[in-house]
Image (cartoon, grey):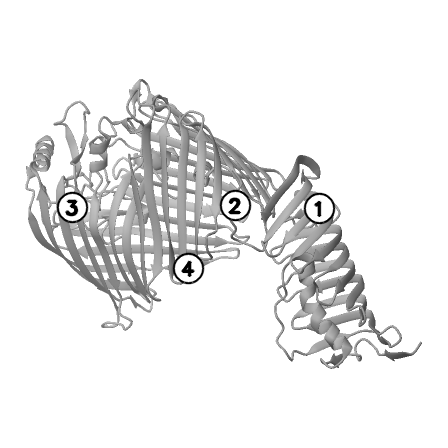
Amino acid sequence: MREAVLRSHRHAGLARLYGATALACLFACAVPTVPALAQDITANPVPSGTQMLLAADTLVYNNDNNTVTAVGGVQIDYGGNKLVAQRVEYNRNTKRLVASGAVELINSDGTKINSDHIDITDDFADGFVNALRVETVNKAYFASESAERMGGVLTTFHNGVYTACEPCEDKPDSAPTWRVKARKIIWNGEKKTVRFENANFEFFGFPLAYLPAFEIADPTVKRKSGFLIPGIVYKSDLGVGVKIPYYFALSPTYDLTVTGTGYTKQGFLGEAEWRQRFNNGEYSLKIAGIHQQDPDAFIDNGVRNVDSGAAGDPNKFRGMMGTKGQFAINDRWNFGWDVLLQTDKNFSRTYAIDGYSDTVHQSSIYLTGLNDRNYFDVRAMRFEVQENTLSSDATARAGEQPWVLPSLDYAYIPDMAVAGGQLSLNVNARVISRDRLDVALADPLDDTSINNVRGIEGQSSRLTTEAEWKRTFTTDGGLQLTPLLALRGDAGYVNANTASLNAINQMATNLGEQDDMRTSLARYMATLGLEMRWPVLFSMASSSHIVEPMAQVFVRPNEQYVGGLAVPNEDAQSFVFDATTLFERDKFSGYDRMEGGTRANVGFRYSGAYEGGWSTNAIFGQSYQLAGQNSYTAPDLVNVGAYSGLDKPTSDYVGLIGFNSPSGFSGSLSGRFDEQTFDVRRAEVKAAYSGLPVSLTAKYAFIQAQPLYGFETDRHEVTLGASTHLAENWRVFGTGTYDIKQSVLVKDGVGFAYNDSCFTYLMTFSESRDLVTKEVSQNVGFNLSFRTLGDFGSSTSAIDTIQ
């Protein structure tokens, strides 16, 4: 035997081997491709001429056996692929590579392969591995007693185990949350599938199901045609439903999902969703439909919900079509849409169609631009209220919802200061069309008892432009003065039909006001204002406090067309006066109303920080109508100023106080109080604790009676929520809302959940009650999610009601 032995120390024995030598040829072929043996993932190609780095305690050439062996702490780095072993031998006669002794190979893509012994041909078409362990890039794990590779694309694991659960650091030998044990696991690198034969599914170490054979997509493949994991749902008027989806991976850029759901009460629901992606955006198209077997299941207290179908019609068809899309035109501009069409007002919510089951769905087509501090948005909108309330004319109810064609918002703030201050410009425009008059009646049986006209039948349009300039000066004493100048102009057109004009006239008669509906209007508002703030800091040994007295004065002419029912109010209906709006220049929520007259807002703001992480905050104040006509005393078509607390020369007091603690406790108290008696007009109390093992939330809301809005009595409502961790990863939670005045539990629900890195389980049960009919609707939702395997259970809309 002739041997040549080269010995070197690990740190000093780093050798560079090139393509002319046998060992270089060995590792040039071997290292990049070994990961494919383990999991059919081909290593990234290594550019020609790439240098290889080899470090070992001993390098042995055996010319008799024609082998080259590296022994002791072998480390090889070639093109980003790293191999570590105690011994690596290459046989030039058989062209086989054998690595042994704590072999670890890390592919350039991050895949880790561990084994005690690897024996493979240098073309990597065939080979064997003993005691194999594989960790993929997405944290999926394979292990087997042995594995063999054939034909360069097929890898077979014998007595293998698969899981997506990371090993426990404290107990690495303990069973993972779930795993699949199989007599044989066949990984097809060409078809990108993994087939399990004679498999057992184990859950927390206990066998749960025996599966003779099943197949899943390669964990490295995100898109592959096949059946998705089924789901199950329950709803009281639908029954139990089993959902089976099938996914078509038609190309890398578009796909199709077809879903069939069988309900025990209503029959078969079919769904199909097409999705397509482009370089600058994506869109989807979804359709769904059902021929209902039992429309009678939707009868409430002997009265039929007309959307559910006519009595005795076993094949009542209900369906929908929806599409969504969003595209980036360039870095500044985006275009998109969200459109829903359905046979009735409540189909998508009744059958929990994902993406279209919101209580109020806004269909829209929009164009949006954003550049630094400048903003542009134009959109067409249609609102659809998906309600369960009984209606004698569903088509009429749908006609009350407006078409907005279009709505435009534009905001511009120059980069440069103007006269030392900030100038801002805002433009708003909207055109609204409604097919049916929308009114609220004090007495549902009396058509003349009109409290307000929420929307006219016909068309109305408005264009608003507003400019504001303000600048802040700070005195030596710390007083901050901010003068403000604002100018606004409106132009509008109203085309109300006879039914709308009659309703407005009847409302004016009921309120003792004038009926002065205009077909066109032009109005302006000029504001001269001054804000004064004096923040004072108090520092103590263990805390710091900032008290900031504030006062604002806004001088304006009277609001034009105030004191008569002259213009529609479409976007300024949701008005609430509280501490958060105390210091607003214009407290109306939209552009259809504007605040007029001279008004002062006076109060203070406070914040405190304490040693140990505690903090507090507060706002308190009052508003005064100093001159001119009070805009909040004059009713519009929706009586927006009534009961607001601003509908008198001296407003109600408004206040808010809150705290946060490092231990997880937080709370707040806010309210509006009568300016003379300090009686509570509106109040909200919130308290919360967030920590382990328990999290709690509580909320109490009180609103005084508002007859003109249809609320004849005071409203009291309590909402409670709780969540507790029974053990690590295990959680129980629940919530409930109770109407104290009507003694009705409006809605309630409980849930149970488990969550770790590879498995999620969630189950909920919820109930809701109609305050008019007292009808109870029940909903059960659950979801099982196995990472890399898929989800099984209800849609997210069935679960989010309690989360």
In this rendering, which labeled residue sits more in front, label 2 or label 3?
2
Q: Nearer the viewer, residue 262 or 504?
A: 262
Element type at mark 2: strand
Q: Position of residue 151 (x, y in %)?
A: 68, 59
- Quick one: label 3 or label 4, which is nearer the N terminus? 4
Residue 184 position within the rendered picture, expressed as x and y whole percent measured from the top left: 71, 46
Q: Nearer the viewer, mark 4 or mark 2?
A: 2
Which residue is denoted by mark 3 in the rendering?
A: 631
Please name the residue that numbered disc 1 is placed on. Answer: 184
For the question of whether residue 352 can be seen, the reply is no
Q: Amino acid at mark 2?
A: Gly
Q: Residue furthest right?
A: 1
Residue 415: image x %, image y %? 29, 71
Label 4's element?
strand
At x 46% / y 40%, what residue is drawn?
Answer: 796
Rate crowding at label 1 as few (under 14), some (14 to 19) or many (20 or more) other CA atoms within 10 Å: many
Q: The disc labelled 3 sits on which kind of residue?
A: Ser
Residue tagged by mark 2?
Answer: 226
